[in-house]
Image (cartoon, rainbow, N blue to C red):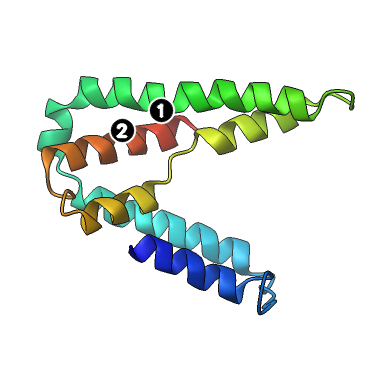
Amino acid sequence: MKVFIFLIIGLAFGPSFLNISLPPETPTLFSICTYGFLFVGGLELSLKIARQNFRQAVRLSLGAFILPFIVGILTALFIFRGTEFKISNVLFLAIALSVSALPVAIQFLKDMNLYRSQLGNLIISAATLCDIVA
């Protein structure tokens, strides 16, 4: 529920409604926040459980990465057909669709009280591996 509320607040403050413009330093702030969130997620990940589920996490992360990557490539080829072909555009769209939403997944797991469970650790491990590959 928190993720939905944060999304609604972001839409309200963004260009859709209140048209609040972001300062030029925003990309740097986004990077710092993303790395900080990944750092905290890593601190809370149980390596003992992650090692036990490593093969499952690898399979899950590969499946979670490869399918959206292929769909991203096909979508990009469809969108950019008839224009000048740039592999960078195709790869950008494919990778953007393949990256997991680790902060969102962590928040959902916390909201559902699954964060400290074996399933939660498997999901976090797989999402982390997926982000590393991307």
Regarding residue 88, the answer to whether it shows in the image is no
Would you place residue 58 above or below residue 112 in this image?
above
Q: Residue drawn at (43%, 46%), measured in percent from left and top? A: 101
Camera-nearest residue between 49 and 18: 18
110 vs 80, left or right, is left
Residue 132 occupies which quadrant of the picture?
A: top left
Look at the numbered disc 2 and give the secondary structure of its residue. helix
Residue at the location (71% across, 28% down)? 76
Numbered badge on residue 64? 1
If the image is split into quadrants, where does the N terminus sit? bottom left
What amino acid is labelled 2 in the image?
Answer: Ala
Q: Give x and y (percent) for residue 126.
A: 31, 33
Left or right of 71? Residue 35 is left
Nearer to me, 47 or 8: 8
Label 1 crowding class (10 Å Cα cut-off): few <14, some 14-19, many 20+? Answer: some
**Residue at 36% of width from left, 57% of height from top?**
37
Q: Does 43 appear above or below 78?
A: below
- Give the residue at x 89% y 27%: 83
Percent across and percent down for residue 24 are 69, 70
Q: Which residue has dot 2 on it?
A: 126
Relative to residue 44, is residue 68 depicted above or below? above
**Of 45 and 65, which appears nearest the observer?**
65
**How far apart are the alpha carbons under marks 1 and 2?**
8 Å
State yes or no: discs 1 and 2 in contact (Cβ < 8 Å).
yes
Question: Could you say where residue 4 lies in the image, as x and y percent from the top left?
Answer: 41, 62
Question: Does residue 20 sit above or below 73 in this rendering?
Answer: below
Determine the secondary structure under disc 1.
Answer: helix
99 sits left or right of 118 in the view: right
Callout in the foreground (1, 2): 1
Would you say residue 52 is visible in this rendering? yes
Q: Give the x, y percent position of residue 57.
A: 26, 27
Disc 1 residue type (three-letter): Ala
